Image: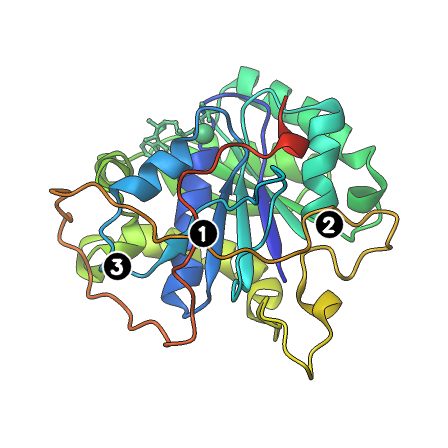
Amino acid sequence: MPVIAVVNRKGGSGKSTLAAHLAVWCARQGHSVMLGDVDRQQSSRAWLRRRDPALPHVAPWAMDQKNVLRVPSGITHVVLDTPGGLHGFELARVVMFADAILMPVCHSVFDRESAAACHAELMALPRVASGRCRLATVGMRIDGRTRAGEVLRTWSEELGMPFLGVLRETQLYVRSLEKGLTVFDLAPSLVTADLAQWDPILQWLRPLLTAPVAANDPSPSQPQAAARVGSSRPSSLKPAQDTLIHGSRLSVLTGARPLNPAPPVARPPSLPRAVADGAQIPQFLKR
Ligand SMILES: Nc1ncnc2c1ncn2[C@@H]1O[C@H](COP(=O)(O)OP(=O)(O)OP(=O)(O)O)[C@@H](O)[C@H]1O
Ligand SMILES: [Mg+2]
C-alpha cells in the first residue's frame, strides 16, 4: 500500500495544500485513498469536512478504541499531511510509514534554509538514505515572472533532491480549498496551466501510485500482512496500526458550494466510505 507523506518543518510551506491535492488525484484515478492528518491543526480533516460528498471520496484518518491508527478496510493508498516543526522522533515515526516524501518549498532564503535542515535530518534516517523512502521537492506559490523556480531547482539539485517543478501562486488554490475542493475537481478548462504544473509531480509518483496494490481487505486467499501499511518492511520496523477498522461516513458541512466542479468520477462499488470521522490524532503520533 503506497504511503506518501508531505513533510517540511517550515510552517505555511504548502503541505496541506499538496496533501489534499494528492489525495484527490488518487481518488479521481479510482483509488481508495485515505488522507491522514498528523497535524494538530487538523487542516486536512477540516478541508475534508467541507468537501461535497458527491465528489470522489477521500477517507479521513481512522482510529480504533485503543487510539491506534488503523487503515480502513478497502483503502489502497495513503497520503499523510504533517505539521510544521516536525522533527526528531516524530519525524522518524512518519518516515517509518512512508514510501515517498514530497517536500513543498517556498522561494525565500528562510524557506530554503529550513528545508535544507529538514532534508539533512531526513537523510540521517536509514529509510530515506537507502532510497526505500524516496524524497523530492516541489516549489510552492511560485511567481512565474521571477527566477524563483530556477533558484529552487538549483538549490534542490545541489542537495541531491529531485525537483519536480513548481505550482504557481494563484487564488484558485486558496478558493478551492475553502470549499473542500482541489484544482483537480474544477473544470479542466479553468485550470489548464495548473494541471500542466502537476504533470511532473504525478509522473514522479506514478510508479508508486499505480503499482498493483492489494486493498486492505483481508480474504481467505489473501494473507492479511500483504495488504497492510508497512507490510514490506522488516517486522522490527512495522508500525502497530496494521489492523482494520470500520466506521461511519465522512460528514460534510451542508451548504458547501463547489467552484465549477468537474463531474465526479464514479466510485467502484467495492471502495469504502466507512470511516470514523470523530477521530483524533493517534497516540503514537501525538507530540
Ligand atoms: N499555489 C498556491 N497559490 C496561492 N496560495 C497557496 C498556494 N498553495 C498554498 N497556498 C496557500 O498558502 C497557505 C499555506 O498553505 P498550507 O496551509 O497548505 O501550508 P502548510 O505547510 O500546510 O501550513 P502549516 O505548516 O501551518 O500546516 C494557505 O493559505 C494556502 O491556501
Ligand atoms: Mg498544514
Whole-number angstrom distance, CA of label 2 to CA of label 1: 17 Å
Image spot of residue 215 (x, y percent): 57, 70
Question: Label 1, on which residue?
Answer: 22
- Please indicate whether residue 39 sits to the left or right of residue 113 in the image: left
Disc 2 residue type?
Cys
Label 2 or label 3, whichever comes before in sequence order: 3
Q: Residue at x 50, y 53 (%)?
A: 201
Label 2 or label 1, whichever comes before in sequence order: 1
Say above or below: 85 vs 70: above
Q: Nearer the viewer, mark 1 or mark 3?
A: 3
Q: Secondary structure at mark 1?
A: helix
Q: Residue at x 57, y 59 (%)?
A: 205
Question: Label 2, on which residue?
Answer: 133
Disc 1 residue type?
Leu
- Please indicate whether residue 23 sits to the left or right of residue 99 in the image: left
Whole-number angstrom distance, CA of label 1 to CA of label 3: 15 Å
**Relative to the observer, which residue lies in front, 280 or 232?**
280
Whole-number angstrom distance, CA of label 2 to CA of label 3: 31 Å
Question: Label 3, on which residue?
Answer: 55
Q: Residue furthest front?
A: 65
Dot 3 surroundings within 10 Å: few (below 14), some, or many (20 or more)?
A: many
Image spot of residue 220 (x, y percent): 68, 81
